[in-house]
Amino acid sequence: MNVFVIWRLTPRQHEREAFTGEGAALYGGRWNFPDIPLVYCAESRALGALEVLANIRNPKIHFSRPWVAIPAQIDRELIEQPAKLPENWHANPYPLETQRFGGEWVRARRSVALRVPSVIVPGEFNYLLNPAHPQFARIRIGKPEPFTFDPRLA
């Protein structure tokens, strides 16, 4: 079995619901519309930190709270690597096409995890997890580890 570790960064106050997809369902994101639960993870803590920086509005407020990095182990066979993405997947603001793409993937339940390229760091990848997928229980979620953002980033 070939196991891969992915990371989820979240404020400590949200660590219990970090893998429910509730936050993405409330607000939506690049790969989902609101009301579609999705868990956004990164292939490293560093990429996760950059994704957080790119997506929060006020770093001073957010970074004044404690954060955690939560590892998750997933078998590579459970990860789908799409052959084709919407042409404008990297556009900012993110386009409706990427939200449709992610929503269709969630509804089709083709896989529990989807590997998508990072907009922020070319050549690196984020991983979308479908918490409603029947194989979600096969993802082994680890213990939260304290994570501190360097104050110069705020």
Image (spheres, rainbow, N blue to C red):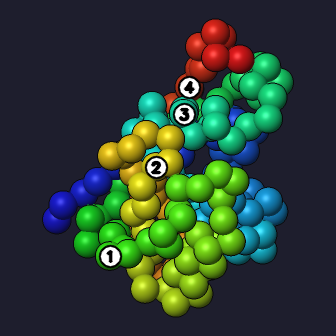
Q: CA distance from mark 3 to mark 2?
A: 10 Å
Q: Tell me the distance, in whole angstroms, between the alpha carbons under discs 3 and 4.
A: 13 Å
Residue drawn at x 56%, y 77% as measured from the top left: 101
The numbered disc on residue 147 is 4
**Mark positioned earlier in the residue sequence (3 or 4):** 3
1 or 3: tag closer to the N-terminus: 3
Disc 2 crowd, CA 10 A, few/some/many (<14, 14-19, 20+): many
Of labels 3 and 2, earlier in sequence is: 3
Whether label 3 touches label 2, CB < 8 Å: yes
Residue for badge 1? 83
**Secondary structure category for the residue under label 1:** loop
Using the numbered discs, state the Cα–Cα distance from disc 4 to disc 2 in whole angstroms: 21 Å
Q: Amino acid at mark 3?
A: Leu
Q: Position of residue 107 (x, y in %)?
A: 59, 87
Where does residue 56 sit, x and y in percent of width and height? 73, 37
Measured as percent of width and height from the top left, residue 60 is found at 79, 20
Q: Which residue: 43% across, 85% down?
A: 110
Query: Residue 50, labelled with which disc?
Result: 3
Nearer the observer, 78 or 108? 108
Q: In terms of secondary structure, where does tag 4 sit?
A: strand
| Kind of residue at badge 2 | Ser
Q: Nearer the viewer, mark 4 or mark 2?
A: 2
Residue 14 can be seen, yes or no: yes
Up the image or down, 148 lies above or below 74; here it is: above
Which quarter of the figure has residue 152? Answer: top right
